[in-house]
Image: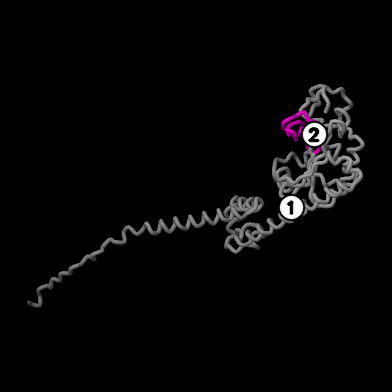
Amino acid sequence: MSEGKPQIIIKHVHKGKHGGGHAGGGWKIAYADFMTAMMAFFLVMWLLSISSPKQREGIAEHFRMPLRVALSGGDKASLSTSMIPGGGADPMHLEGEVKQADAEEQADATRLAEMKQKLDELIEKSPVFRQFRSQILIDITTEGLRLQIVDTENRPMFELASARVVPHMRAILRELAPALNGLPNKITLSGHTDAIVYTNDRSYGNWELSADRANASRRELMFGGMAEDKVLRVIGLADSMHLDRADPRNPINRRISIILLNHRTQERIERENGSDGGMRVGKVPVPVASVAPAAPRTAVATQ
């Protein structure tokens, strides 16, 4: 070949036998994202299952935070116990709180059971209680230790169709007052009537009568020495909840129910009715409406 003739170079490009084999590998990334999301979901479900209602409220509040606040770790309290960058509660810390709450509830249940035993013994030994033993019922409910004082046919707790406490009922309540101070738990008082309709006009009926009787019982407990801040709620239930459902007119349906609340129920009532659990009206707490004891009336039926 002469020196002036250009050289032609032919380059052969051989395609790999598996060319384009990785073009469909994107599914692996999608699958990895899916597994990550599922792991996060199960982690959240696990946290919810071991958390108390109060802790779940905290978690919900965390997710309601503005993004900037959440990224900075939320409030200082949550940040101080966090092992997760950017805030959030440590799962181990939450589990420890749950165990502590369970232990406290168990201790609370034990205290209430011991109080029931003390009340049973007091009723058996006290001359005041012993003669009215058949009118005093004590049991443990999901809300706490319940003590009910019921009417009998020949021994009512209040004067006819009124909220005036008769002497033996006054003695029972005042004897009971110091015993209720033995535990820090707060109490609720509920008044009940039987199904016989009491009314003299539309302004006063079984609802007002049951509420007045519950409040009259509260006053007697105060006179007996029970701390005033011991009472969390006083309500009248009229004849909406019978003790003897088979006979709504049975005198035992006329009763006063006193519940020494367990801590879980007490916290629930305070949370649902407190300033953070509902609407506020101005800056002054709005008390539960009550009806002052009415003047003696002529009742249509005995209550």
Cβ–Cβ under 8 Å for marks 2 and 1: no
The answer to if 2 sits in the magenta stretch is no
The residue sitting at 66% across, 51% down in the picture is: 54
Quadrant of the frame with the N terminus: bottom left
Residue 78 percent coordinates (x, y)? 65, 59
Q: Is residue 221 above or below residue 104?
A: above
Residue 3 percent coordinates (x, y)? 10, 77
The magenta region covers 234-256
In depth, the one of 50 and 33 nearer the eye is 50
Please say whether residue 284 is visible from this viewpoint: no
Q: What scheme was used to colour the molecule?
A: one colour
Please say whether residue 98 is visible from this viewpoint: yes
Q: Which residue is mark 1?
A: 109
Which dot marks residue 150?
none
Kind of residue at disc 2: Ile
Q: Residues within 10 Å of mark 1 (few under 14, many from 20)?
A: some
Q: Which residue is mark 2?
A: 252
Kind of residue at disc 1: Ala
Which of marks 1 and 2 precedes in the sequence?
1
Residue 44 percent coordinates (x, y)? 55, 54
- Is 174 left or right of 187, judged from the image as shown? right
